[in-house]
Image: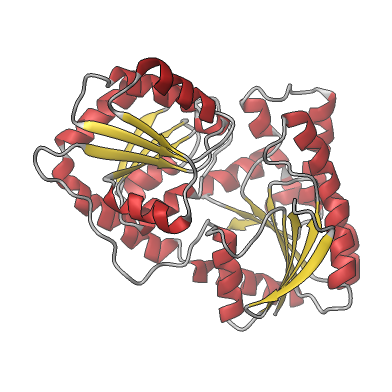
Amino acid sequence: MNVLCLFQKFDFSSSTIYLDLVMALKDRGHRVMIISCTSEEKESYFEERDSISTGYVRVPDQFSSGKIKKGLIQLLLGRKMLKGVKKYFWNEKVDIIIYPTPPVTLAGILKPLKDHFKAVNYLMLKDIFPQNAVDLHMMKEGSFIHRLFKGMEEELYAYSDVIGCMSSKNMDYIGVNEGESVLGKLEIFPNTVKVLETEPEEPRSEDGEKVSFIFGGNLGKPQAVDRLLKGIELLKDFKEAEFIFIGSGTEEKKIEDYIEKTKPDNLKLLKELPRREYEELLKSADVGIVSLSPDFTIPNYPSRILSYMQMGKPILAVTDKNTDIRELVTTDACCGYWCYSGDEKAFAGTVKKIVSEKELLPALGRNGRGYLKENFNVERSVDILENAVKAGKQ
């Protein structure tokens, strides 16, 4: 099949679930075409790499911008991408168009793409916007900007033939809140990765060593960094655990200020690392942390959890009560621990429990990796997309 991908950011040097998906599609024998935004100086350019065709369209850098400028840039993306499709792929045969959220601002170009290519429009729902912005108090419900983006979200769902949701609760949420118009479009499309063949090193559990907890990824408001810092503060005299944050984002300065002010013995902050260096550091860690704001009413399912499972690391999920990450970690995969992100004392207590049971960590890590192989292998995503095209042709 011929696959057209619309990504607001994509490159071959960054390890992401989208790179794994694109490569898996190519390896299965499918033709892959990509339109991606870029903030490089060149206006637009075309690249053929690993038998994958990519057209890049230039937009201002939104990832280091304030929320107003970022919102304005998001409004440009659809028009820019449509222009790129017309320039590079308009005369190609396309069977399926895949695109993730964010952004929702592609809504306006889905109908013209559908009319032209007669392809299956497949939404990979990775973010429920604008409700997530309302939950984080970044947008006022009912405001002009909220109504604007809510209208785009509804249009996005309307012009998508299939809406692939990350988890069962994710799918239930959309079904309840968007009504009958979307019910026949919903299916599970989980976050997936290429499973590495080499078995990872198991977490160490020697007596006398600190248990190291690592947090890798974006440091933004969704990750409730301030809550984590409060929990770590409660553990300042607990010498058996240490915490390492790796990444960057809008909340990064809070960690820097905390370290500067308190000089903690149990916390380190490292900037974003190249993939290989990050994986080497992750190998030496004992537990991976996933954190979500307690204010979320939407069931998020962050892909960060997959890198921990891939490396055989047990997981400490510090989340809201609406996501089904809790069920994944404690019941489905049996690969770690959960506590409510709105309760710093519970976080501190869970860390102490993990330390007291550190002999269990290797088995929990193996459980997570085994579950990843069975449920989050990128080949499953390719199967789902192939089935969507077959169903669309019936």
Residue name at image x 39 percent, y 47 percent:
328
Q: Horizontal placement of 372 versus 361: left or right?
A: right
- Between 43 and 16, which is closer to the camera in this rendering? 43
Q: Position of residue 215 (x, y in %)?
A: 40, 40
Residue name at image x 54 percent, y 41 percent:
300
The mark tally for this picture is: 0
- Between 219 and 6, which is closer to the camera in this rendering? 219
- Between 47 and 22, which is closer to the camera in this rendering? 47
Which quarter of the figure is the C terminus placed in? bottom right
Q: Where is residue 185 in the image (x, y as percent from the top left)?
A: 69, 57
- What scheme was used to colour the molecule? secondary structure
**Farthest residue, direction bottom:** 29
Q: Look at the image and tell me whether residue 24 can be seen.
A: yes
**Farthest residue, direction top:** 261
Q: Position of residue 146 (x, y in %)?
A: 78, 29
Q: Horizontal placement of 187 versus 66: left or right?
A: left
Within the image, what quadrant is residue 119 found in?
Answer: bottom right
Residue name at image x 27 percent, y 39 percent:
212
Which quarter of the figure is the N terminus placed in? bottom right
Q: In this view, does 14 lie above or below 206?
A: below
Q: In this view, does 41 lie above or below 387?
A: above
Q: Look at the image and tell me whether residue 342 can be seen.
A: no
Q: Is residue 235 above or below residue 28?
A: above
Residue name at image x 41 percent, y 26 percent:
228
Q: Horizontal placement of 378 versus 118: left or right?
A: left
**Farthest residue, direction left:** 207
Q: Where is residue 277 in the image (x, y as percent from the top left)?
A: 40, 54
Q: In this view, does 117 lie above or below 206?
A: below
